[in-house]
Amino acid sequence: MNYYNHWEECVRKIEQGQIKEAESYAVKTASKFKVKQELIDKIFSVNLQSYEKKIEEFLIECIQRGKQENAKALLLYYSLDNGWDSTIYICQDYDSYDNKWCSSSTSWVDIGKARGFSGIYKKDAEAAFFCDEISSGICILLMLRTTIAFYNVAVKYKECGMKLCVTCTESDFVVIE
C-alpha cells in the first residue's frame, strides 16, 4: 500500500484552502491506520504559536531579501529527523513540474527548531517515514500540523510576488496560493 498517497490528498486539500477538510481527512486516515485517539489528541494539543511567530518573523525578512534577489519562491524546509530544524530557502527558480527548482537557492535563513513534534516522531512513529500504517498516520498528522502552521502565516503574504512553499522532503512541496 502506498501510504504517501494519503498525504498527497491532504496536500491537495490544503492547496485549495480546505484546511478543515484536510484536518478531518488526516484524522480519519490516522484512525483508520490504528493511531490511538490519545496520540491524535496529543498531536493536536501541541501549541505551535511560537513556531508560527518565528515563521512570520523570518518570512518577512525572506520576502524582503527575495525581492532584492528577484527570487521566484520561498521554501520552508523542516527536518523530521533533526527536531523540526527549519530553514527558509530563497529560490531563484520555481517550476511546478520539476522539483529541482529549490536547489537553485543561493541564500537561506535558519529559523530554528519547532518544539513538540520531534519526540512524537521519534518515539511514537519510531522515526519511520511512511513505513507502515501507524508511522504513516502519525507522519500525516505531524506534517499536516506543521504545514498548517506555515499556511496560517503564508496566507497573509501570498501577494508578495513569490510562491510560498513548505516541505519536509526533497521531492514535493505544498504551495500556498
Image (cartoon, grey):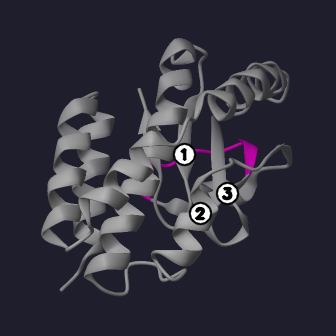
Q: Residue at x 28, y 27 (%)?
A: 17
Q: Secondary structure at mark 3?
A: loop
What residue sits right under mark 1 in the picture? 166
- Looking at the image, tell me whether mark 1 or mark 2 is earlier in sequence order: 2
Horizontal side of 153 relative to 92 (left or right) equals left
| Residue bounds of the magenta highlight | 86-97
Q: Residue at x 45, y 56 (%)?
A: 142
Q: Residue at x 19, y 73 (%)?
A: 33
| In this rendering, the label closer to the viewer, 1 or 2 | 1
- Looking at the image, tell me whether mark 2 or mark 3 is earlier in sequence order: 3
> Vertically, is 89 above or below 52?
below
What residue sits right under mark 2 in the picture? 100
Q: CA distance from mark 2 to mark 3?
A: 22 Å
Contact check, label 1 and label 3, Cβ < 8 Å: no
In front of the other: 53 or 157: 53
Q: Residue at x 59, y 63 (%)?
A: 100
Q: Position of residue 173 (x, y in %)?
A: 47, 52
Identify the amino acid type marked 2. Answer: Lys
Identify the amino acid type marked 1. Answer: Val
